Every structure is written in C-alpha cells, then in structure tokens.
Amino acid sequence: MNILQPDTVAARGALQIPEPHGYDVLQALPAAVYITDASGKITFYNEAAAALWGHRPQLGKDEWCGSWKLFWPDGRPMKHEDCPMAVSLREGRDVRGGSAIAERPDGTRVPFLPFPTLLRDADGKMTGALNMLVDISGQKQREEIEMRLSAIVESSEDAIISKDLDGVIASWNKGAERLFGYTEQEAIGRRITMLIPEDRCNEEPSIIERIRKGDRVDHYETVRVRKDGSLVHISLSVSPVKDHAGRVVGASKIARDITERKESQHRILMLMREVNHRVKNQYAVILSMIRETSKRSRDSFEFENQVRDRIMALARSHDLLVLAEWRGATVFELLLAQVKPFGNEDCITMSGPSIVLQPNAVQYLGIAFHELATNSSKYGVLSAPGGRITVEWKIEAGTDGKKNFCLLWTEVDGPAVPEVSEHGFGRIVLEKVTPAALGGKGALTRLPNGILWTLRTPMTYLEATGDADDRVPELAAEALAKV
C-alpha cells in the first residue's frame, strides 16, 4: 500500500531526498519513521511506524505523533502536544534523551525512544520535522529481568558469586557476605582461592578446567574457610558464564551452607553407633532372660508370658529413649512407664529431684522397676486394695566427696509377702544385675506386709551428664549370664 499523500510534498522538498528513491528508503527502514509539517500535522509515516502504533493516523489531520495514546515512562498519561516531537516543533530544537510509552488500540504498550529532528529549507526556515521511534521493549524486558534476577540474587540465603576464568571475584551477594564473612568491597577483585583451605587447593584448577569446557559442577560437597579462619561445609554448584558470542568468560558459583546437615548426619551416625552398642547388650540381656526364665518356669505357657512381659518392659524403656533421641529419660518418666501396665498406680507415691538418666540407666533401672511391679501385682500391694507403695530417691554426698544416688522402693500395708527365693529371677535382677549395670549396690528386704528395695550408686553411672564406664552395661550382661 502506498501511504504517500500530496501533503508530503513540502516534506519531500525539505528533505531534499531524490525522487522516488528517497521515500522508498524511508519506507523500507525497519525503524519507525514519520514526518510532520511545521504545524505538527503528520504528512508521512512508514510501515514500521504503523506497526509500532498499532493503527494508521490520518495524514494532514492527526498531529505530533501517530500513537493511539501516550504515557510518560512512569505510567502517567501524556498529552500529544507534550510529546517530544511537539516540544521540538514548538521550541525549535531537537529533543534528545527522553522516552515515552505508546499504547495501541488493543491495550498493549510499547516503550520507545524518540529522536525528533527539525527539517529546514535552503533559507534555514523550519518546514517540519522527522522523528524516528526506537522500540525498546526488548531492552526494557531485559532490564526488568536483570532487576528481578539481581533482587533474587541479593535476597538469596545462598552465597552467589561470579568470577572470571582466572578466579578473580566479579560479584558477591549478601548471602556470600553472611556465609564467608567478607563484605562485597573486601571480596570483589580478590581471587576465589582465599576461600579454599590449603589442603584443598587442587579443587579450583579442576573446577575451572570443567567450566572452560562448558560443563557444570552440580552439588559438589566440600569445605571452605571463612574470614575468621573457621571452616564451613558447603554444597557447591558452578555454571559457566558465556558472552553474547557463546564463549565461556567466567563462572557463577552457588554455595549453600550444609554445616547443620553435616552435624545432623554426624549425630545420626553417633546415635546409630550408640543404638547398635545398646542393642547388642540388650540382645545379651534378652538371651539371658530367656535362659533363666526357662529354668524357673513350670510350663511353656508361663515361660511365654514371663518372657513376653520382660521384653515388653525393655521395649517401654527403649521407647522413652527413642522419644528423647536417645538422650535419656527422667526417673519419674521411667517409673510411670513401667508400673502403668499393671494398673492401680494411684496407690504409688513418687518423690525426688528431677534427674535425667543416661540410656544405660534407663534400660537397667527399667528392668528393676518391672520386676518390682510384677512381684507386687502377684503378691504385694498391686494385687489387693489397701496398701501403698512409696518410691523415693535423693542425692547424697559420699565419703569420697562424690555424689551418690539413693532410691528406696517401699511397700507397706499389703498382703503378707511370701519368702523371696534367693535364686528367683527378680531377686537376681534387683541385687545383682541392675546394681552391676549402674556401678552400685542393691538390697531386697522382706517386710511383714511388704518389701523394701534399696539402690545406691554413684551419680556418674546414672546421670545423663555423667562420665560412665562403657564397660558397665557389658558387665551387667555378664552378671546376668553367670546366674
């Protein structure tokens, strides 16, 4: 379609472009170009201008600019008479450095840079103006993307660093500052090797070699050194940075602090080792329980019930340890867990300081509480109403100046208690196995209408903060095995 109109004659003469090639050139330009006369009426526009505006203005009628609507860069509406082309014609000067936004009839908006240039005849009289509009949508989108990416990088909890192929740091975000302790000013321009421990200096050349080839390094777990000299475990991902020609010119690093995860893994490993150690001892105790229970059982039914009950007692103690991540349990928690299955716990009174028992003490003291509760449910206070059980514990000063734990289980006002066999499994647990496991001494005494069990042991073998002998659980298992 030929959009040249008779109104363009003045502009044609002012441009002094040879006919007809001059306007053919303007029409073929990929940039939006239009011309107005001295009053601002549009006399010519090319197809690129019509595409940018999204419609075709009326030649000789529409003024200043062919945009459907105009807006300032901040989004405020702009009147056509305030556009750069109108300012140029009104003030008689070429306007540069401004920008505007054109809105098409369909509502889409196009940011652009205008370059209005005044046209003059041979006498220097202004005859009109030519304007070229440069669509900067792509540039604005890139700027917006860059701003978003920059905001993401700055707000990231991870350390994000860029460097050139010589290992010189080019960018350094807040996450890197928090992780490594260097400020942006301290880090940029220095070599990345300042973060690498001496025993890992061979890592950087191998990483750079892979980056030069265009390869990525994903989730590489390593150790780096902070400004204060402390070491930090990190997971490192490195990607090549390329220029517009696709050449690798640097690398982008994302470093994530995995110290907490490493510590958690270490705790889990130590816990598993502890559990493995304790379970092995429990196996020995269970095997001994089975053997000794079989010797003292009248029939298979009694044997099955007693073994099941004793293993369940161990399981209850184990559950307390699992809930506390194997750190231990209090005397109160352990006692309640072991007597609750027997019912009638209202007749039990407990008193004593809050003491967290170490895992070994939980297991072996739990066995003792189970045997006491079992005996009471068969012959003592828990078998009939009227009596009461008092469990008291306290911390005493020993003759050597160290602290000792003293516990008394007292049953009174219950049924007459039969003579306790010296070779009964319960007595062996209360006087030999549990005391041996806790490095102390135990005694079981028969009362007219009840029993008294006392346990005295050093706090170092009992309390979770103590420094117990690792051999004590094994000695307890051995004591039970020799019964």
Image (cartoon, rainbow, N blue to C red):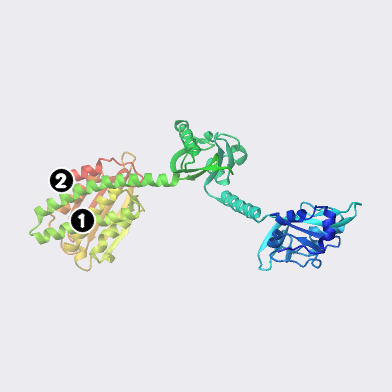
Q: Nearer the viewer, mark 2 or mark 1?
A: 1
Checking the image for residue 277, the label placed there is none
Residue nearest the observer in this picture, 21 or 344: 21
The answer to whether the residue labelled 2 contacts the one labelled 1, judged by CB atoms less than 8 Å apart, is no
Q: CA distance from mark 2 to mark 1?
A: 16 Å
Residue that lies at the very extreme toward the front in this rendered image: 20
The residue under the point 20% across, 61% down is 376
Q: Is residue 390 above or below residue 160?
A: below
Kind of residue at badge 1: Ile
From the top left corner, tell me how far across and down residue 146 is, in percent. 61, 51
Q: Is residue 62 visible?
A: yes
- Comparing 122 with 479, the one in front is 122
Q: Residue at x 72, y 57 (%)?
A: 27
Q: Residue 320 location, x and y as percent?
A: 31, 55
Residue bearing the label numbered 2: 481
Q: Is residue 221 left or right of residue 10?
A: left
The local crowd at label 1, few if under 14, some if 14 to 19, many if 20 or more residues have their Cα within 10 Å, is some
The 10 Å Cα crowd at callout 2, few under 14, some 14 to 19, many 20 or more, is: some
**Which amino acid does the dot numbered 2 rest on?**
Ala
The quarter of the rendered structure image containing the N terminus is bottom right
User: In the figure, 452 relative to 261: above or below?
Assistant: below
Q: Nearer the viewer, residue 10 or 436?
A: 10
Determine which residue is flagged by label 1: 311
SS class, disc 1: helix
Disc nearer the start of the sequence (2/1) = 1
Residue located at (37% from left, 44% from top):
266
Q: Is residue 48 left or right of residue 87?
A: left
Q: Is residue 286 above or below residue 66?
A: above
Looking at the picture, how far across and down is residue 444, in whole percent? 19, 52
